[in-house]
Every structure is written in structure tokens, then in C-alpha cells.
Image: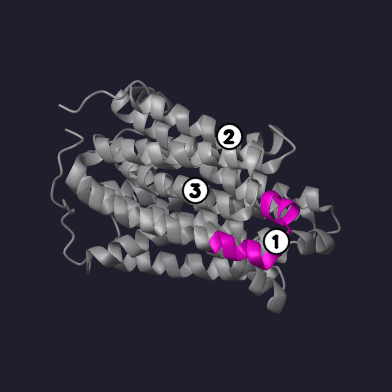
Amino acid sequence: MADQTISAIAVAPRPEVSSTFLQIAVLAALAATGTLATNILLPSLPQMAVSLKVSSAAVTSAITVFLAVFALGQLVVGPISDRYGRRWPVLIGFAVFCAGSIWCGLATDLPSLLAGRVIQAAGACATSVLSRAIARDLFSGAALGRAMALIMIAMAAAPGFSPLLGGALDHYFGWRSEFVFVGVFAAIGAVAYEAVLGETHRSTRTPLNPLAIAKNYFALIGDRRFLIPAATVSLIMGGLFSMFSAAPRILIEGLHFTPIQLGLFFAGTVMVVFAAGMLATRLAPRFGLDRSIRGGLLAAAAGSIAILLVSMFNPTFLPFLAAMSVFLLGMGIVNPLGTAQALSPFGEKAGAASALLGFWQMMGAAIGVWLAATVSHEAMFALGIVLTVASLSAFGLYTMRPKAV
């Protein structure tokens, strides 16, 4: 498939699906489940530590454990869905996530909470990774790019708005109410998925055995049509998560923001990502995926370098905000279009391709978070270094992509 060929929407033959809008809305809910379950807890970590009689540092392991299981689980769920279809893995994933949410809400000590988080993540990884595979089942070409842009907006909105939501729930009902909320969210998502989408995997079912799975993954890694856009997106996503992790240190400790102001900052980032996602849907049909992605990478690199310069010469809020907005604009273009480009040639292996891409993205996020916390004691300077290295590496890597034929 020529990556720059802008084709019409290719929808799987399912007449009972009501509309493209509903399809994308349900896919967005699937994609947002994991990030919602992670970031909604951030304002409540101190209260959780007091309630469970552990330190604040110890209770943050609830985030780390979730991300680790979330990343690794995707490698298993993708091949399962390629063999048995999307419907049952998604529905089982929602059920497991709900069970984990109930477990977490009833936890009375940290080990019990961590066990619940493992269960939660095992369910969330199914819904997240399969949102991309289902999008690939339903759409192709520019339509897939548009769908991915809207799904990405939901994934950005979840970490952007969920700290504000979590803070409100914690204030009025206590931290356990957050697990009630995400459990109800997942239950509604399961009903909506069954009503609107159901089974979408119409391609040849691939065998489910370790050798076949390994062969699929190694074939994807060896194919530059997948490897380069997937690795590019993963580097940019690593930068995004490093920004989320460093922002509290930069704004609260360095610039003396209040927690509410920090929450409003996160919410504001969603507006930038939303604008970038809308822009991406217009750029791809007009300029093609390659040129649009290159433009997004240039914007991300420019914003990253600007953050580094701001950290060294004028570490104040408005210059930081301006530079960060440029990075987010580029990220918001690269992420959906790069994801669409990585998945488009692999319809029969969309589940495995989406799983491997999701795993790389979460590993990139974990590495970005770790580097932003360890490169330097100056949080803004450390973030500038991480973003600059990630963005320039992504741009250099993308220039190695094979030309479309």
C-alpha cells in the first residue's frame, strides 16, 4: 500500500453500526480507559498513602505497576485478537478492568491495592491496544488518520482532565470514589462497544502459538514500513509523558503554582492537542502522510529546543508555555498520522502491530519519565534535554523511512 495514497473510508460490512461518529466515540472511550485509570489518582496519592499507612513514595508504585502490566499485556492481547477476533478480548478486558477497580476500591493495604492495579491494567491493556486494531479494521488511508487523530484527542483528554476530576471526587467522596467512577466508565464502555461495534476483524485469522507470535513480531520489527513510524511515534510519546511527569516539579516546586492551577494547566494542554488533531485531519488529505508527519516532527523539535533554551535563559511560565505549546502541536500531528502509517500496511496483523506499537509507546513513556527525573535536578532543564533528544532522534529516524511506491 502506498502510504501517501489518500483513500476513501473503507468500512467493514456491518450495517447495524449507526455512524462513523459513534464508532470513533466508542473507540475513543476504549483508548482512554488506561490513561484515565492512571491520572485520575494523581491528586489523591497523599490521601491514599495516609489511608493505607504507607509513604507517598511507596504509594506511587500503584502507577508504576499499572504502567508495567499495561505495556507487557499488550503484547499478549494483540495476537489473541488476531486469532479469535476483537469482540471477546474487548468485553473480557472491560470485565477484568471492572473487577480490578472494585478490588482497588476495597483495598485496605498497599499489597492489596497493587494486586487490584495489576488486574485493572490487565483489562485496560486489552481495550487500549484493540482500539487501534479496530480502527484499522474499519478505516484506511486518510480516514484512518482522521480516526487516529480523534482517538488521540481522547487519550490526551484523559490525562489532561482526569486530575481535575480526581481532585473533585477525592474532595467530596474520598479517593475510593475514583475507582468507582472508572469502574462505571468501563461498564458503560462495554455496553456501548457491544451496541455500536461488536466484531470487526474480518481478515484471515492468524494462528495462536508462540512461534507464530514471535514470527509476527520479528516480521514487523524487520519491516521499515512499520518500524520507522512506530519508533518515531514512540519517541514523541516518550517526550509527552516526560512532560506530564515533570510539570508538577516545574510548576509547583519551581514556579509556585497551586495544585488547582496545575490541573488547569493539564486541562489547557488538551486544547492544544485537540487543535493539533483537527489540523492533522486536514493536513493528511492535502499534503500526504509523509510531509505532514515531517512537519509535525519539525514543530516538535522546535518546541523542544525552545524549552531547553527557556530553561537556561528565562525559566518563567509564559515562555515555557509557548514553547510547550509548539511541542504539543507537533506531537498532536505526529502521533495519529504516524500511528496510521505504521498500521495501514498490516490489515491481517493489525492486532499484533497495534500491540507492538502500544508496547513501544509505553516503554518510551517509562523511559521518558525516568530520564526527566534523573538527568538533572533542574526539572525544566531536564525536560528540555529529554524532549530535544527525543524529538531530534525521531526526526532523524523518520528520514530513513522507505519512500512510498
Q: In the rendered view, tell whether residue 201 sits above or below residue 305.
A: below
Quadrant of the frame with the C terminus? top left
Residue in view at x 44 percent, y 70 percent: 188
- Which of the numbered marks, if any, corresponds to residue 257? 1
Q: Earlier in the sequence, mark 3 or mark 1?
A: 3
Residue 251 position in % (x across, y down) = 67, 54
Q: Residues within 10 Å of mark 1 (few under 14, many from 20)?
A: some
Colour pattern of the rendering: one colour
Query: What secondary structure is marked by label 1?
Result: loop
Q: In the rendered view, tell whether residue 285 sits above or below residue 212.
A: below
**The image quarter in which residue 371 lies:** top right
CA separation, marks 3 and 2? 26 Å
- Which of the numbered marks, if any, corresponds to residue 386? 2
Instruction: Please tell me whether mark 3 or mark 2 is closer to you in this view.
Output: 2
Residue 135 position in % (x across, y down) = 30, 51
Instruction: Please tell me whether mark 2 or mark 1 is closer to you in this view.
Output: 1
Which is more toward the observer, 350 or 85?
Answer: 350
**Magenta-colored span:** 249-267
Residue in view at x 34 percent, y 23 percent: 219
For residue 125, side relative to residue 167 (left or right): left
